[in-house]
Amino acid sequence: MTVLTSQPEWQRLTELATSVKSTHMRDWFAEDPQRASKFQTEACGLYLDYSKNRVDQEVLDTLFALADSQGLSAHREAMFGGANINNTENRAVLHTALRNFSGEPVYVDGQDVMPEVLATLEKIRAFTHAIHSGAHVGYTGKPIRQVVSIGIGGSFLGPKIMTEALKPYTHDAVKVHFVANVDGCHIHDVLSTLDHTETLIVMSSKSFSTQETLQNTLSAKDWFLSQGGSQQDIARHFVAVSSNVAAATEFGIAEENIFPMWDWVGGRYSLWSAIGLPIALALGFDNFKSLLEGAHEMDKHFKTAPSKQNLPVIMAMLGIWYRNFFDAQSHVLLPYYHYLRGLPAYVQQLDMESNGKQVTQAGQRVDYATGPIIWGSEGTNGQHSFHQLIHQGHGIIPADFLMPLNVPNQDDTHHAMLASNCFGQTQALMQGKSFEDCYKDLEGKGLDEEQRRSLAEHKTMPGNKPSNTILFEKLDPFTLGALVAMYEHKVFVQGVIWQLNSFDQWGVELGKVLGNQVLAGIVGSADHDQFDPSTQQLIARFRKANAP
Ligand code: F6P
């Protein structure tokens, strides 16, 4: 038994889970008319109804006590204070400093990072203004009208999904395209529609060593030169965001065109840094700043609100409850807002790359479940496919339903239907439909007793399936910033409980190394014996199909 599982709070939660498993949420609602109003809270423009969860006050109190016993406050202070909490890489974790508008310094190794953070923000502002106003023109004197953002992982998902989510706020000066995959179809499709004289390439790579991003940028450079641009003109059409300034300069990006970031910003936490430059270009600097301000507001809430009102803490501890005491393998995100359809993919990277681990910070193998599978897609589409499994499949899949109360440019009928589906699903998941009701519905349908019983069994919905509902007035930049920061802190709290380092990613790093080794095998510059027989066979097939 590890330190975590031997905690008295953990032991108590195990006992409580046994009794909660024999209780139905619909009985709780029937017994306590105040239940819905008891289990709700609000902060930073986000309203959370968590009453449709399989918890009572004692469970919640014990979950919060567990968080205390794991030293949540001290861990939180360490992160905000710039301690090297990413212990396997000996780095601080300070995405919160990137949106720190408190005027307070933030120290890393005794040095205040805020002056360079603010200077970079000013550089983003000035550059965005220069592009939008037409002060920065392409080499033929034409204004920049198209931006191609090249990056992958955290250097892609944040900018792409925030830009998509804030579509109603799009600035009309430029159109921003995103390319991530090394699959050549993508960059080809994007570039083939563009005029190189009015195109800006933003190459985003913290390490400046990621194969996909380097290759896509090389292809963009070849395209630019093949269209008539010269080596000298590149300075007006290519900029980079990276913490590796030396590699970016060596690659040919002019030093003044490099937007810095720092090793204390993790890739999946980097949209608040200059990695967010494409967001500023797409939406305007003021909207980008408002996104950061919303996140800062959530930081303040997370730092100061007591657990029972603290959105990230509540969401995190509910997740622990289901993952560790109900064996929930996955968690589904269901945004009922088309523009927010990318959120599941964003949180998927954030959560799974952070807490997809099985060794504690101290290097011990865990004996409890850690990060769940995160998935989902926009409502109502999912209702006509995978919701079946959430309603009637084996086990439970806790769900987050998200919806703005107001939407731009839409007729009210659509929005009311969307809301009714969203709320209706949470109700159906909670209440289910009993065998008795289904059996009654089949009366007079011409079925014999056996057929009637059997069909009623198929139609029975167990219910008792947990969900959170998160509502907000509208999805403006501030609210989106708060929402994303809420999920960041949720993941942080869970990492603290599970005693993980949520800020490294050795699993995906290995993928990068192996990808490069296999590439050497494919192009013939590496000995094939180093690969396993299956991989050798795959390489051989590929080489044969591509032989000159
Ligand atoms: O794929 C792993 C990863 O390291 C992510 O964490 C990161 O966001 C992505 O690669 C891109 O890395 P970079 O910004 O260094 O190109």
Image (cartoon, helix red, strand yellow):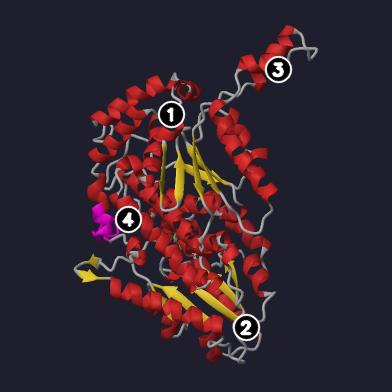
Which residues, given as a range, are shown in magenta? Answer: 77-91
Q: Which mark is residue 198?
A: 2
The kind of secondary structure element at disc 4 is helix
- Disc nearer the start of the sequence (1/2): 1
Q: Residue furthest left?
A: 110
> Residue 114: percent from the left, percent from the top?
29, 71
Report the side of 137 relative to 298 (left or right). right
- Disc nearer the start of the sequence (2/3): 2
* Amino acid bearing label 3: Asp
Report the side of 269 relative to 337 (left or right). left
Instruction: Indicate which label's residue lies in the foreground, 3 or 1.
Output: 1
Classify 384 as above or below 10.
below
How far, Cα to Cα, is label 4 from label 3?
52 Å
Which residue position holds label 1?
A: 34
Q: Residues within 10 Å of mark 1 (few under 14, many from 20)?
A: few
Which residue position holds label 4?
A: 300
Instruction: Indicate which label's residue lies in the foreground, 4 or 2.
Output: 4
Q: Quadrant of ligand 1?
A: bottom left
How far, Cα to Cα, is label 3 from label 1?
31 Å
The kind of secondary structure element at disc 2 is helix
Q: Quadrant of residue 444?
A: top right
Q: Quadrant of residue 196?
A: bottom right
Evaluate whether residue 401 shows in this view.
Answer: yes
Q: Main secondary structure of the magenta part?
A: loop
* Amino acid bearing label 1: Gln
